[in-house]
Amino acid sequence: MSKIQVGVYTIGMVQTNFYYLHLEDSNEVVVFDPADNGDLLYEKLTAQGLQVRAIFLTHAHFDHILGANELRELAKAPLYAYEEEQVLCEDADNNCSRECGKPYTVVPDRYLKDAEAITAAGITVHVIATPGHTVGSCCYYIEHTDGEEIQHILMSGDTLFEESIGRTDLPTGSTSALIRSIRDRLFELPDDTTVCPGHGGFTTIGHEKKYNAFV
């Protein structure tokens, strides 16, 4: 088996990270948070010979979904979100897109449950419910081995950043819930887990345990 490669494009009005993951020997990818310009993201991926097999949303704030419908239509790939995020996915007021002058909603092909796993492009993605940034925020955890080394990867959305945490002052946010989610769910993961946040740079669970003053 081969290792997972993590690619990222930073896009949109607030510089959101759009991630695409694939096995080294495969041209099939799973992607996370198509933040804007779904047609451009599709072009960038196809220019590399990559084919989207699944689209995951960590949450449904406008700056993480504005390219979702376009990318889904072009890629002919299913789109997933955690079930508690329906109140943002399907409401332009709750997801703040109307406030930003771009009313936008998205209806996933399927809403996922906590601890559910989806396998696409040879990669198994596990749902971790992490309410706080929004009521239906979730993270996606991937544990993959190439036969010699185990990779631990977390797509943390806007729940956990490098030495910071997500804001909680938007609809359905809760600071206490966010801190509980990080302490009780994310900090249980291996210390060497690579954290891929919705904004900013990469970090690890071990680093955040030591240096994140918010939790």
Image (cartoon, helix red, strand yellow):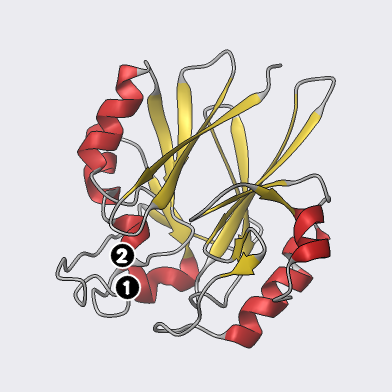
Near-viewer residue (131 or 102): 102
Label at residue 106: none
* Residue 71, x across and y down, in percent: 27, 40
**Three-letter amino acid code at disc 1?**
Asn
Residue at the spot 20% in from the left edge and 64% down from the top edge: 104
Q: In which quarter of the image is the C terminus?
A: bottom right
Near-viewer residue (41 or 208): 208
Any part of residue 73 in sight:
no
Please identify the quarter of the rendering in which residue 2 is found.
Answer: top right
* Residue 138, x across and y down, in percent: 56, 63
Residue at the spot 32% in from the left edge and 73% down from the top edge: 95
Label at residue 62: 2
Residue at the spot 31% in from the left edge and 64% down from the top edge: 62
Above-or-below relation of 74 to 34? above
Q: In which quarter of the image is the N terminus?
A: top right
State how far apart marks 1 and 2 are (Cα): 6 Å
